[in-house]
Image (spheres, rainbow, N blue to C red):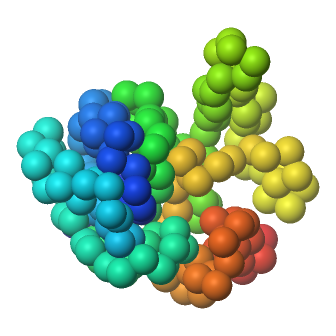
Amino acid sequence: MPFFTVVVPLFNKAKYILASLESIAAQTFRDFEVIVVDDGSTDGGREVVSAYRGLPVVLVVQKNAGAAAARNRGVKAARGRYLAFLDADDQWYPDHLKEIAGLIASYPGAKVFTCAYEFKYQQDGRSVVETSGASYAGAVDFFQEGRHYFFCMNSVAAERQSFLETRGFPEPFRHGEDLAPFMELALKHL
């Protein structure tokens, strides 16, 4: 059983998925499997994943049903003890899984783990980098700190068995669906 399962929902992100997969392949913590769920892409992203040889990838294909459905499908296929999520147009630094594994070792009773993250984007022709979550250390109250955006989907990991006891990502939602199972975990394990 791998320590982590990395779940990557893919929908029309062909020009980004290779960089995402390369960031997973570059992880210094190596005990993981990767599941990419193609959610009905029409831009060739599925072919990019199929041709990728940087690490073994399980590719699951489904009709377009949204990010929540794709993540839920990846969770169902997961074998890892912990779930880590990465969107198809995002990347991790090489020590991301190592940092999360360190948090798991330091806080063995916790069910959800996160670390700092950066948003990089263009604004008025200049590059902008925003860091979030870097000022937190230790266990936090999800409901107290959640209002400060201390995690995002690409920085969070969860114990798989506990996650499976939630209702998962609510598939009818198109926005905010990524927070729901983590709120449910926080309510169950306060």
Viewer-side residue, 106 vs 80: 80
Q: Is residue 72 visible?
A: no
| The quadrant where residue 38 appears | bottom left
Quadrant for residue 178, please give it.
bottom right
> Where residue 79 appears, x then y in whole percent?
28, 71
Task: Write the residue at 33% across / 47% down.
Answer: 14
Quarter assignment of residue 70: bottom left
Q: Is residue 147 visible?
A: yes
Residue in the foreground of this view, choosing between 87 and 45: 45
- Left or right of 150? Residue 24 is left
| 34 sits left or right of 105 in the view | left
Identified at 24% across, 59% down, the residue is 46
Q: Position of residue 56 (x, y in %)?
A: 13, 52
Which image quarter is the C terminus in?
bottom right
Q: Indicate the position of residue 143 as horizontal and vertical percent values.
A: 86, 61
In the orientation shown, which residue stands out farthest toward the front?
42
Q: Nearer the viewer, residue 102 or 44?
A: 44
- Residue drawn at 28 percent across, 39 percent down: 18
Residue at screen point 79% across, 59% down: 142
Give the total of numbered labels.
0
> Seen in the image, is 113 located left or right of residue 62?
right
